[in-house]
Image (spheres, rainbow, N blue to C red):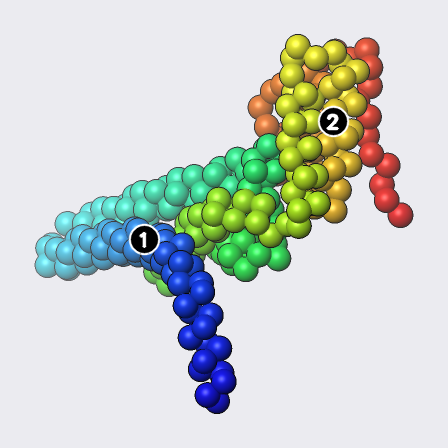
Amino acid sequence: MDEFFRGMWDFAGSYWWLVFPLMGVAGGIGKSWERASKRRHERRLETLRLKGELKAAQLAARGGAPHQARQSARQAAADERASTRQLLERLFAEHDEVTARWLDYELDVAKLIAFPAMSDGRQPLTAAFLRAKKIADALRPASADAKLSEAEIAEYVDAVGDYAVAFDIAERDARRLRDANFSEVERKRLDRARHLLTVALDDAATQAERNLAYKRVREELDGLILLSDEAVDVLEQKVAGQIGPARASGAAPAPSPEPQKMPLPREEPQA
């Protein structure tokens, strides 16, 4: 036991400087949780306010004449639907904003090379974000006019908040790590892929040069970063000069322009 404590103190004395970067990481994660908690608290207060208005309308309807009560009840129901729709529209906007920030990495090969942890589901924080995304997507109503119970709305409120927090934390960690989880040889491959990607997207290069650079980018990234089919499609369009809006998952493909004189090389699927 004495040897264990001596070894621990020796380690602490030699690597005391690690305390500062670790404190920075912990502080960043804490701030992300604090911001998300504030957003969730604000949404809950808004939900409570809407419920209070509905209860007040219902009580007013009960206290009036029958005809006025029926009119007030109809008005209360209409107010409830409008309030729920307003709340869901705000949640949809926040949900879509986080998804757009994620797709900005998922569809941009240059960003994936710079921050590979964002596409690596083996990273704990990235995996946590992907789980939060799956839950939020599953709980998302079909439209703002969907009929939901209070419990379902509250569940979706929490899911969107968790989704936003998980993304903030995963992004912060990926930007901190960069290529730190790769070996020296793998980092050199990433660096070569980064330079080759610049050539592949250079309008001043010939199409043959761009095609060759693209092929070598795929070779350098093979086994290091898993590119989604959508990311490959967007990259190929850019290399071939078919620059257009990025295709998100489920979006209709953009019309293809005239074919290029030199076909873009595609990798053969591995056995």
The relative height of residue 194 versus residue 240 in the rendered view (above or below) is below
Snapshot quadrant of residue 115? top right
Horizontal placement of 38 versus 234: left or right? left
Which residue lies at the image location 54% right of the left edge and 53% below the top edge?
A: 126
Q: Is residue 240 visible?
A: yes
x, y (%) of residue 76?
23, 50
x, y (%) of residue 52?
18, 56
The relative height of residue 172 versus residue 63 in the rendered view (above or below) is above
Snapshot quadrant of residue 166? bottom left
Element under disc 1: helix
Viewer-closest of 206 and 32: 206
x, y (%) of residue 98?
45, 43
Amino acid type assigned to the residue bearing label 1 in the image: Lys
How many circles with numbers are drawn on the protein?
A: 2
The relative height of residue 7 versus residue 257 in the rendered view (above or below) is below
Q: Is residue 253 visible?
A: no
Q: Residues within 10 Å of mark 2 (few under 14, many from 20)?
A: many
In the displayed orientation, state which residue is furthest to the bottom.
Answer: 1
Mark positioned earlier in the residue sequence (1 or 2)? 1
x, y (%) of residue 88?
37, 46
Viewer-closest of 38 and 8: 8
Mark 2 sits on what residue?
214
In the displayed orientation, state which residue is furthest to the right.
Answer: 271
Q: Residues within 10 Å of mark 1 (few under 14, many from 20)?
A: some
Which residue lies at the image location 14% right of the left edge and 59% below the top edge?
A: 59
Amino acid type assigned to the residue bearing label 2 in the image: Tyr
User: How many angstroms separate mark 1 from mark 2 (CA)?
Assistant: 40 Å
Q: Disc number at residue 31? A: 1
Element under disc 2: helix
Which residue lies at the image location 39% right of the left edge and 40% below the top edge?
A: 93
